[in-house]
Image: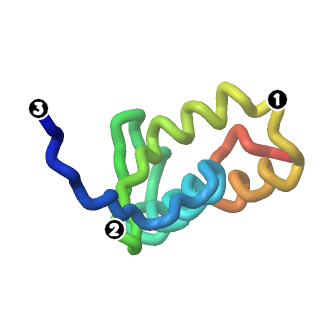
């Protein structure tokens, strides 16, 4: 039995996770005001991909002691209260 050959899948190139998360955070801030999004929040990015922004923010908070001052500055610019460099 032979397997049918398929064309390779074509996906847009992925951004590094922190860069994608920051982009999603900027999109979130541009459209919504108020507190941080919940853990289950997902943001549709302009390139058509979906980013799980809520989980990304929770992960950044858990890893904040390992973030560089520059990374914390980006999060602080997004309005995340615990991200003071």
Crowding around mark 1 (Cα neighbors within 10 Å: few <14, some 14 to 19, many 20+) is few
- Image quadrant holding the N terminus, namely top left
Which percent across, then down, holds residue 38? 39, 38
17 relative position to 70: left or right: left
Residue 20: image tag:
none
Q: Secondary structure at mark 3?
A: loop
19 relative position to 55: left or right: right
Along the line of sight, the residue nearer the viewer: 28 or 34: 28
Which percent across, then down, holds residue 31? 39, 68
| Quarter of the view holding residue 7 | bottom left
Q: Which residue is mark 3?
A: 1
The residues tagged by marks 3 and 2 sit, at their Cα atoms, a distance apart of 38 Å
Q: Give the number of the mark in front: 3 or 2.
A: 3
Which percent across, then down, holds residue 22? 60, 58
Residue drawn at point x = 66 percent, y = 26 percent: 62
- Residue lying at the far front of the rendered structure: 1
Residue 65: image tag:
1
Q: Which residue is mark 2?
A: 48
44 relative position to 18: left or right: left
């Amino acid at each position: 039995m032979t397997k049918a050959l398929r064309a390779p899948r074509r996906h847009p190139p992925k951004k590094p996770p922190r860069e994608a998360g920051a982009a999603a955070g900027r999109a979130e801030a541009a459209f919504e005001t108020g507190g941080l999004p919940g853990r289950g929040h997902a943001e549709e990015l302009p390139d058509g991909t979906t980013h799980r922004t809520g989980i990304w923010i929770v992960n950044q908070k858990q890893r904040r002691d390992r973030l560089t001052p520059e990374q914390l500055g980006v999060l602080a610019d997004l309005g995340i209260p615990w991200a003071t460099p």
